[in-house]
Image (cartoon, grey):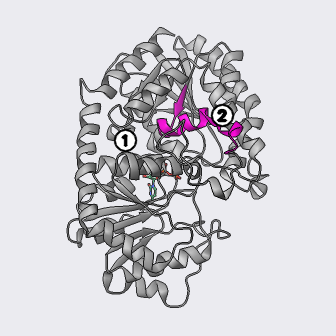
Amino acid sequence: MEQKGRGVGLVLFPCPLQGHINPMLQLASILYSNGFSIIIIHTQFNSPKSSNYPHFTFIPIPDGISDVLDSISDGFAFLSFFNVNRAVPLRDCLLRLLSDGAKEAERIACIISDSVMHFTQGVADSLKLPRLALRVSSTASFLAFTAFPVLRLKGYRPVSDSELETEVSELPPLRVKDLPAYNMDNIEKECQFVGSMVNHVKPSSGVILNTFHHLEESELAKFGQEVPIPIFTIGPFHKLFPASSSSLLSQDRSCITWLDTQPPNSVIYVSFGSVASMDEAEFVEIAWGLANSECPFLWVVRSGLVHGSDRIEPVWPDGLLELMISGGKGCIVKWAPQQEVLAHPAVGGFWTHNGWNSTLESICEGVPMLCRPCFGDQKVIARYVSHVWRVGLHLEINRLEGGEIVRNIRRLMDEKEGEEMRERVASLKEKAEVCVRKGGSSYESLQDLIARILSF
Ligand code: UDP
């Protein structure tokens, strides 16, 4: 283990969602391996599995979310809740730590908090503690957030159906329909939230990005102009530390045994991440599409995937589940060891919602994608996957229908265009490997980040 950070403590504060916890704990592991001591302050809701990180200190703070969880309708309301309510418990906890740290002769250099937890900037300022912001999504999606005020003036928030295909001249190659969207019923609140997030990154002591130079070169240059603070582009984090130990759900490894029985590049892996959900009709169309595709599939059907089935299993139409898995053609699990699945030689395609972690994990394993973004930054990412990096097909059909699904799975898995995407993503995979190696851009940026932390 490197010793550069010895005697220096770091406080990390993740946003309590799987797609945010994974990169924060990966970052914690990266910094720990450079000698820093790690303290994770976390909410009780979705608290990370501390037993998987015996060398970190975990401190829970009360979050009050369980009392209101039923009334929280979407991810946006969820994030807003934390930003409005958690400043006092976080500040109290930090105050205690700072006074204990002084006694124990280990200084706490800074807090690293998720950019969506924007209230943490005010808390850090009030304690004169430097804050580094962690952005867990793509650079392009952050640029889209910074453009919200202009987009609003141009009438793109809210948006009329006639403008959906319009190119957004400030953010090529995005169209109006690719812009991030969280809460179209309350544009005012949505813009306020996005504005607060952006405006609280700007006064931070630096921003850490889970991406790599080669992937988003021009977006990173623009980001540097928009947000003139130190930027540390040190991803993909999971190339250095896998996400499996920060999984909130237990990963069903039986799917790896099933993958072992399948020919190379033959299986389509289907997963929509930890939050996205769909209506029952769409779920059933996907099931029929997979059943009729003649392509072996591994599908993650987690509790809550179907609207209204939160924390319970979806109801399968009579006989459909049996048809899907008969003869070993398909495998369905509640939660998979995703990184290992994507790295498995049998997996030839990934039908994804384009969460940023899933997208990076797919790129880093050289797996082309079928993109079906649901909300938020996923639409921006899907557009980049299909139109900038050209390593995926964007399923842009309004209502999914079994026949279309079969056709697109074939395009990805069996046809020449899928083969070309596989070649392009293999080249990106190599570039990602070079970036994190000694001398690579992410490696060098990590050294800069360490120097920055030590300068606090
Ligand atoms: N994941 C997993 N098992 C699954 C599905 C997802 O371990 O069956 C992990 C995946 O590897 C990724 C994270 O959950 O690291 C999902 O993050 P992402 O940003 O892709 O999507 P989100 O869940 O935030 O929408």
* Ligand 1 within 8 Å of the CB at mark 1: yes
The residue that label 1 is drawn on is 238
331 vs 148: above or below: below
Residue appearing at x 65%, y 68% in the figure: 307
The x and y percentages for residue 155 are: 70, 43
The x and y percentages for residue 144 are: 56, 38
User: Are there few (<14), some (14-19), or many (20+) residues within 10 Å of tag 2?
Assistant: few
The x and y percentages for residue 250 are: 47, 59
312 vs 294: above or below: above
Instruction: Choose top left, top right, bottom left or bottom right for residue 300.
Output: bottom left
The x and y percentages for residue 310 are: 65, 66
Q: Is 149 a magenta residue?
A: yes
Contact, mark 1 vs mark 2 (Cβ under 8 Å): no
27 vs 49: above or below: above
Residue 150 numbered tag: 2
Residue 352 visible within the image: yes
Upstream in sequence: badge 1 or badge 2: 2
Q: Is 151 a magenta residue?
A: yes
The kind of secondary structure element at disc 1 is helix
